[in-house]
Each structure stands twice: as C-alpha cells, then as structure tokens.
Amino acid sequence: MPRTGSGELPAAILRRHGLTPRKRLGQSFLRDRSFLTHIVDAAELGPEDTVLEIGAGTGILTRALADRAGHVVAVELDDSLYRLLQEEFASVANLELWHANALDVDPCERMPRDYKLVGNIPYYVTGPIVRHYLEARCQPRVLVLMVQREVAERMVAPPGRLSLLGVSVQAYADAKIVARVPSGAFFPRPKVESSIVRLTPFSQRLAPGDRDLFFRLVRAGFSTRRKQLVNALSVGLNVSRDRSKGLLRRAGLDETRRAETLSIDDWHSLARAWSKEPLREAR
C-alpha cells in the first residue's frame, strides 16, 4: 500500500526520495492534515465523483481525495514529484497520474463532462489557472482551491474593492472563502498565509464573443488605476472622452464612478450598451 496513507508528512516523503522543495517554482506542501477535511468537505466528494487535482506534489491531498472520490486524476508538472507519485501510489486503483502542465490540459478531451477540480495553486499562476478552467467548454462542477490569502480576498471582494481578478472570477462563478490557512500549515513555511476558496460556476455562461467584449471593457476600466471610468475607458478603449461618456450614460452609470466600485451587473450593463453601439472612434 502507498506509504502516504500512514500519515507521513511532506518533509519525510521528500527526504525518503532524496528531494527538496524547489523555491523557484513556489513549491510549498500542505503538512497540517486538519485542513484536508476542509478541502474534501468543500468539494462535497462522494464515490460517484471524478476529481481533477492540480499540483499533486507529495500526494498528501491526493490520498484524501482518493479515499473519498470514485476516481482521481492528479496532474503534476515537476519531473521528480511525478516519479515520487508513481512510486507512492502504484497500487491505488482509483488514481490516474498525468505528467503535464495544468494549463495545457483540455478538460473536454481528458475529463468526463461532470467533474470537480481541486488544487493547491502557486500565487503566480492562480489567475491563469482559474480563467483556463472557468472558460473551458467543459467547466468543472465546482472548484476548491488553496491560494494565497490576499488572492482569495480579491476573488471574493465586493464592489468597492473589486479588481480585475475579482471580476474575472465573479463573472463566471459564485466565490466564497471556506477557511484561512496559516503559513505554519505548510512545508517549507511560506511568507504568506493561504485560504481555501470554493468557486461554484453559474449555469448560464458568457458566449465566446460576448466574453471577449466583456473583458475588453473590464481590462480598459482597470487599465489606469484610480481614474474615473470615463477617463479610464477613453484611454483603455482608445476612444474620445465624449464617446466614453455616452457609453456610461447608456449603461445608466455615473461617469465619475471608478472601476473597483462597479458590480458584475454593472459590467454586464456596460457590455450590453457597447454591443448596441461599439466604440470604434479613435481619439
């Protein structure tokens, strides 16, 4: 049987395989098993579920997922950790290992239509990972991610504190923080705290064309920090200030608003107003 089931901690597993964490890749492994329950419970796993795990690492979370779910697909990019997982989980029948970059995985080709996604995500790839799977034709039914605490707070931020990341997440899914995870719960101990976030995708989705228009507006709105929207949109969309003002008026928004104060519904109103009269006039 795989020795990860014995309660062995990441440091011991790595040492046994002659490995050390690679700081360049932001490798930090969950060592406090009490948080495994938070993750597994948040994903609401049962024997009928298939789970895609991103960044399996030393397999601590992988074991907990395999104990609860019917089938687990664990993705690991690091060559040495992939070989470690092959040895540790050689006899686990309901586990499939993929040696791949999670950003290169097409879930429509590799996963069943109804799957769940779980992972401990390095902060520098959080945005790309979330967008990749939320925008996929085959969305996961739920995503439960361990991310840097500040990133988690941006994901769930209300209007007034919204960022480009917050809009990018909340346009696709309901987001909530399940638990805060102190830095001491990891090996090696990172300089920042983490949080477990649960994302539940909406049943209605943006069509690709609508999505491109929507996010072009959002990027324009956040392109110039602390500027009023009328000025930020003028600069970001390369249109006259009058055209920008007209867009906001048609969307029913005050031109003095700033991007971080808009709700997701406000952004959709802007996108609808733009789709009726695209802003193509150069300044």
Image (spheres, helix red, strand yellow):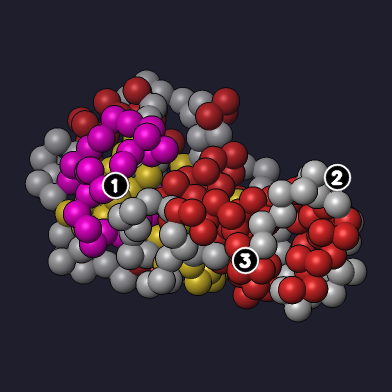
The quadrant of the rendering that contains the C terminus is top right
Does residue 66 sit above or below 22 in this rendering?
A: below
- The CA distance from mark 2 to mark 3 is 20 Å
Mark closer to the observer (2, 1) = 2
Q: Is residue 264 left or right of residue 200?
A: right
Name the quarter where the N terminus is drawn: top left
The image's mark for residue 283 is 2
Q: Residue at x 37, y 44 (%)?
A: 54
Q: Looking at the image, which is closer to me, 100 or 228? A: 228
Query: What residue do we see at 53% from left, 69% from top?
Result: 175
Label 1 sits on what residue type?
A: Pro
Query: Given the image, on which type of amino acid does mark 2 rest?
Result: Arg
Looking at the rendered image, the disc whose residue lies closer to the viewer, 1 or 3, is 3
The magenta stretch is 95-121
Does the magenta run of residues contain 26? no
- Using residue 238 as the reference point, say whether residue 185 is left or right of it: left
Q: Residues within 10 Å of mark 1 (few under 14, many from 20)?
A: some
Q: Amino acid at mark 3?
A: Lys
Q: Residues within 10 Å of mark 2 (few under 14, many from 20)?
A: few
117 in magenta: yes
Residue pointed to by mark 3: 276
Q: Are marks 2 and 1 in contact (CB under 8 Å)?
A: no
Q: Which residue is mark 1?
A: 107
Q: From what the image shows, is residue 212 above or below residue 14?
A: below
Res 125 → quadrant: top right
Q: Earlier in the sequence, mark 2 or mark 3?
A: 3
Residue 24, which numbered label?
A: none
Residue at figure coordinates x 67%, y 43% from the top left: 191
Residue 97 visible in this rendered orientation of the protein: yes
